[in-house]
Structure formats: structure tokens, C-alpha cells
Amino acid sequence: MRMKHWAVLVLSVTAGMLVGYIDSRPTWDDTGITVAAIIGTGLIIGFIERRRSWLWALSIACGFSVFQLNSNHVSVTLAVLAFSLLGTYLGALVRRAISITSSAGDKGVREK
């Protein structure tokens, strides 16, 4: 893997761990904000590197699950994986749409 892939991998695991840490606090009871943070993290990481979106989603879910090890909630880990997959593929889709739009705009400028 290239250096950029390693950096994105470390970033996604760290971001997942941060969200997991905040979610594991006893006073934290805002599931909607946690889900939005997971999707947002995936969106940003998927936008940064659109290839291997499944790997970035898996690394976010693994980072999050570090703080869920003492509980027997497999469904939480699967939900985090699902939301991180949604975020990373959405970010990759946005990145692709922007690149297609900008390349189509460049062709229009060259024709004039």
C-alpha cells in the first residue's frame, strides 16, 4: 500500500476510536449524534480516498469497537459497520461526481 493509504487507514481507525470513546462514556446517551459522527467520518474519509471504501469503513468500525469490547453487543458493531459503509461509499460517490463534473467542465472550456 502507498503512504497515502497508510495515512488514511490510521486516520480512519483513530477517528473510529474517538467516536467509540465518546460513545462509551457513561453520561453519553445521544445515539443520533453518534450515528451522524460515524457517517460523517466515513463521508470525509471516503472523499479523501475513494478507492478501498470497504477497508476504510471496516477500519472505522474496528476503531469504534475497541471501546465496545466489554459488552456483548454484536449488533452495535454491525450497525457501526453499516453506517460507516454508507458514509465511505457516499463520500466516494461525491468525490467521483465532483471529478466527473470538473472534467466535463474542462472539456467545455477547451472546445471554445
Image (cartoon, helix red, strand yellow):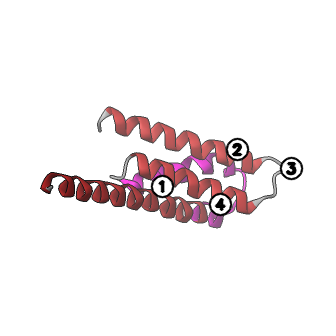
Which residue corresponds to mark 3? Answer: 27
Q: Amino acid at mark 2?
A: Tyr
The quarter in which the N terminus is drawn is: top left
Please report contact status of discs 3 and 1: CB closer than 8 Å, yes or no.
Answer: no
Q: Which residue is mark 4?
A: 35
Q: How many marks?
A: 4
Residue 24, above or below 87: above
Mark 3 or mark 4: whose residue is earlier in sequence: 3
First to last magenta residue range: 52-78
Q: CA distance from mark 1 to mark 4?
A: 13 Å
Mark 1 residue type:
Ala
Tag 4, which secondary structure? Answer: helix
Residue, x 38% and y 47% (percent of image)?
49
Given the image, on which type of amino acid does mark 4 rest? Val
Which percent across, then down, holds residue 68? 68, 52
Going from N to C along the chain, the mark reached first, 1 or 4, is: 4
Q: Nearer the viewer, residue 17 or 66?
A: 17
